[in-house]
Image (cartoon, grey):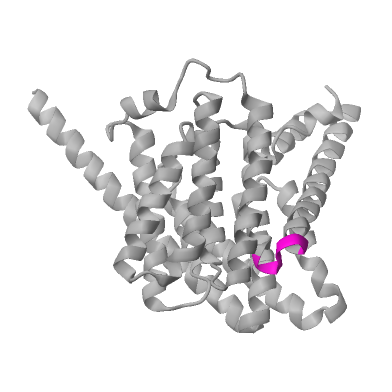
């Protein structure tokens, strides 16, 4: 296996292979892991910088969100014919675009309705196989792009152009990688089989409701960086329903430690070195397969932008509090859905007997 082929594995798989390998094979796997992380970071910097330079700093978020989708599309398709898949992708980016304009203008009840319906449609279109994690990618991108809305004429034009360019990039990858996949399955076949008795569709509904409640609660509270609540809630509501509490505790511990380290770094590092924190954290994210360390390192990227607007310590405190609220939302929604599911299961057994 070449180093390039080894680089196609994710960090968790590579680290497991490293533990099992010996001698020269082990060294090659270590090189593959480090090189993979470095190249992804380099590509991310170039890709996101393209959007910032062409369309302004406010559209770097479009670059970040579409970059995540781009990486996902390299490996994971939508589970149905390429023509329908392209239309689905364009629908997703259209939702990103429209909601970038309108969400901040809506009354709170309509904000809830639009967010829920948008997230549900996006998940329905893109997550036929949620176990591969692409649902989280699209939900993350939706939250990131639409939470950083635009209002003025020039901003509207730039956001439109940025999302159009991102859609083209993602569409090209989708077509190149998956044009021959699932040729016998059309999207209407997916809809025809839709039933809340299936775990995938229950999960889509649960995730859409959970994120929407977290975002709406943030709007009601009028706190900055509401998107952090959405991310935290999303992290709890994975397709896998076991160890939900442990995952929540792991995340909040990682956020507390990551935010604290970031605050200390800004106090003790020379100001000319602070810009390195984001790239170093990004490199670390590519090397780790641990959710705890990912939670720690994600704080550096999140706080690097927030502290300029809010101040160092207030940004750190807000990072922790917003994550805590989002996690509580996620835990409550997960518990409610579990109780409802058990209730209907017991009713079905009673009727059958």
- Where residue 212 sits, quadrant-wise, is bottom left
Q: Is residue 147 magenta?
A: no
Left or right placement of residue 224 versus residue 116 in this view: right
- Quarter of the image containing the N terminus? top right
> Is 319 above or below relative to 83?
below
Q: From the viewer's perspective, is 56 left or right of 340?
A: right
Main secondary structure type of the part rendered in magenta: helix
Q: Position of residue 174 (x, y in %)?
A: 63, 33
* 351 lies above or below 264: above
Q: Is residue 88 visible?
A: yes
Residue found at x 53% / y 17%: 183
Q: Where in the figure is residue 260, as x and y percent of width and height?
A: 65, 74
Number of numbered discs visible in the structure rendering: 0
**Which is more toward the observer, 348 or 8?**
8
Which residue is at 32% across, 64% downward?
110
Can you tell which quarter of the image residue 23 is in?
top right
Q: Is residue 293 visible?
A: no
Magenta extent:
53-58
- Residue 317: where, in percent of width, then height? 55, 78
The furthest residue to the top: 184
């Amino acid at each position: 296996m070449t180093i390039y082929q080894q680089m196609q594995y994710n960090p968790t798989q590579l680290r497991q292979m490293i533990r099992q390998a010996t001698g020269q094979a082990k060294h090659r796997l270590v090189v593959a892991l480090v090189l993979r992380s470095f190249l992804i970071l380099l590509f991310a910097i170039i890709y996101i910088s393209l959007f910032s330079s062409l369309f302004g700093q406010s559209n770097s978020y479009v670059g970040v969100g579409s970059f995540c989708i781009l990486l996902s599309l390299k490996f994971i398709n939508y589970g149905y014919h390429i023509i329908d898949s392209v239309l689905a992708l364009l629908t997703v980016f259209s939702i990103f675009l429209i909601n970038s304009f309108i969400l901040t203008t809506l009354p709170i009840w309509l904000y809830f309705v639009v967010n829920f319906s948008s997230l549900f449609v996006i998940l329905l279109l893109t997550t036929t196989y949620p176990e591969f994690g692409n649902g989280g990618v699209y939900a993350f991108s939706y939250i990131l792009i639409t939470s950083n809305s635009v209002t003025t004429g020039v901003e509207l034009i730039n956001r439109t152009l940025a999302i159009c360019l991102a859609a083209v990039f993602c569409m090209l990858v989708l077509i190149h990688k998956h044009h021959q996949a699932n040729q016998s399955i059309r999207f209407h076949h997916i809809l025809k089989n839709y039933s809340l008795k299936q775990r995938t569709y229950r999960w889509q509904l649960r995730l859409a409701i959970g994120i929407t409640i977290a975002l709406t609660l943030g709007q009601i509270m009028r706190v900055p960086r509401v998107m952090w609540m959405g991310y935290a809630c999303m992290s709890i509501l994975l397709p896998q329903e076991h160890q939900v509490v442990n995952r929540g505790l792991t995340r909040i511990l990682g956020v507390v430690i990551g935010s604290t380290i970031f605050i200390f770094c800004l106090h003790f590092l020379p100001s000319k070195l602070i810009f390195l924190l984001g790239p170093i954290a990004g490199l670390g994210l590519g090397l780790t397969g641990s959710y705890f360390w990912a939670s720690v390192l994600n704080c550096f990227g999140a706080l690097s932008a927030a502290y300029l607007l809010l101040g160092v310590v207030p940004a750190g405190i807000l990072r922790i509090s917003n994550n805590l609220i989002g996690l509580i939302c996620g835990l409550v929604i997960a518990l409610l859905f579990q109780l409802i599911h058990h209730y209907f299961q017991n009713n079905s057994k009673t009727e059958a007997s």
